[in-house]
Image (tube, helix red, strand yellow):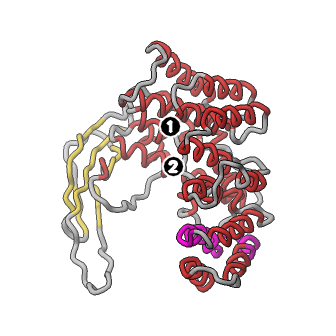
Amino acid sequence: PIVVSQPPPATPGQAEKHPLHIPIKTGLLSKATGKELQPSMVLELKGEKETFVFDNVPEEPIASILRDFSAPCRLKFERSPDDLAFLMAHDTDDFNRWEAGQTLATIVIKDTYNKLSAGESPPALPGVFVEAWRKVLTATDIDRSLQTYSLRLPDEKTLIGEIAAPIAPDHLHNARQHVRKGLVEACKKELREVYDKLTQEVAAEGGVFKVDEPSIARRRLRNALLISMAVLQDPETVKLAVEHFETGLCMSDRISALYALADIPVAEREAVIQKFYGDSKDDKLKMCKWFAVQAQSDLPDTVERVKELMKHPDFELKNPNKLRAVVGAFANNNFHFHRKDGAGYSLVCDVIKEVDKLNPQMASRFAVFLAGWKNVEPVRSAMMKAQLERLRDTENLSNDTMEIVIKGLSG
């Protein structure tokens, strides 16, 4: 049986809430084969708690619940890592397959984060997770766009919402990188094989750029695989990324090659950055991409690089798109925004003070990043708060920005 409950919380002006009618699309999968024992059917939850019993099920199944995201609600359902890995590898529902993978990846990254925070070495990746990831990577019965998203780990911004404050940003970043690298090392052979297969498909079609759905999905997957392989930072992948850039059929291909090289301190990285600039300097959209890739880099000198980018002839402080591409991208670079010496906070604060004179709305949005000072560990928290206090004491600061600053300091 499946027991489902919905304790409706009280809301302002409505102390007593009545149960909602929630459609829960559900299927049952065989643990032995991964095939469906019970095709999808909709269970209708109308009361606060209901029990659903399935008859004539020949073996103990694994339930796939809330298929196709059949209701806009959060499902709390305890799953073992083994069950999540099974659903990630075998679920016939695309949404649930993706969600199981994201949930399992989050568990593995959180476990690694906890170990690093305790001063311990990062653990080996669970075998069931690696094999499920490999299964998704080599699957041929899955939409390639979904395959791309299913192979992608939750980003740091998402993970922050899953970890209790105060957070150590460097441990979180290193935990995610450890998991990412572990997956790529374990599946390096398959990654290259799938990448080469996709490359051959492009060549078989004459290397012609197409905008149909299959071509877009293939391009998305191929670019994602290149970026994944780049985490190893080995000469083979550097060479591959340069080839990917040089043979790219569109901006998506070339910018993906640039992302693949962005974290690797090699001469080829700088050469590709300059080549992309030379080819794209007259295209404002491409230039925003060019700025953002560098501002999101993991390399140690990223703060200094951002300062140089803000002096670049093609950067304009008055241009909101350029600001978002450089300062916005940097502030979302969790690792370097939270750099241990506080240089990231100081940089963003300096920018806010300048931008506030020109565009208070944009300045106030940047101030939001500093307002989260209570969510990080004490040393960084104190440095973020100090920058908010700098802004509070700034003469003629706009009402827009001051409102965020005051709320941040008092919150």
Q: Is residue 147 above or below residue 72?
A: above
Q: Which quarter of the figure is the N terminus placed in?
A: bottom left
Q: Which residue is mark 2?
A: 104
Q: Which residue is mark 1?
A: 132
Residue drawn at x 73%, y 74% is 378
Q: Residues within 10 Å of mark 2 (few under 14, many from 20)?
A: many
The residues bearing labels 1 and 2 have C-alpha atoms spaced at a distance of 10 Å
Q: Please, what is the three-letter code of the amino acid marked with disc 2?
A: Leu
Q: Is residue 327 above or below residue 214?
A: below
Nearer to the camera, 92 or 180: 180
Whether the residues at callouts 1 and 2 have beta carbons within 8 Å, the answer is yes
Q: Secondary structure at mark 1?
A: helix
Is 119 placed left or right of 162 in the picture?
right
x and y percentages locating residue 140 in the rendered image: 41, 25
From which residue to which does the magenta span run?
359-383
Q: Which mark is residue 332?
A: none
Ranked by sequence position, the earlier of labels 1 and 2 is 2
Q: Is residue 227 magenta?
A: no
x and y percentages locating residue 35 in the rendered image: 32, 34
Q: Is residue 174 above or below residue 50?
A: above
Residue drawn at x 64%, y 23% is 243
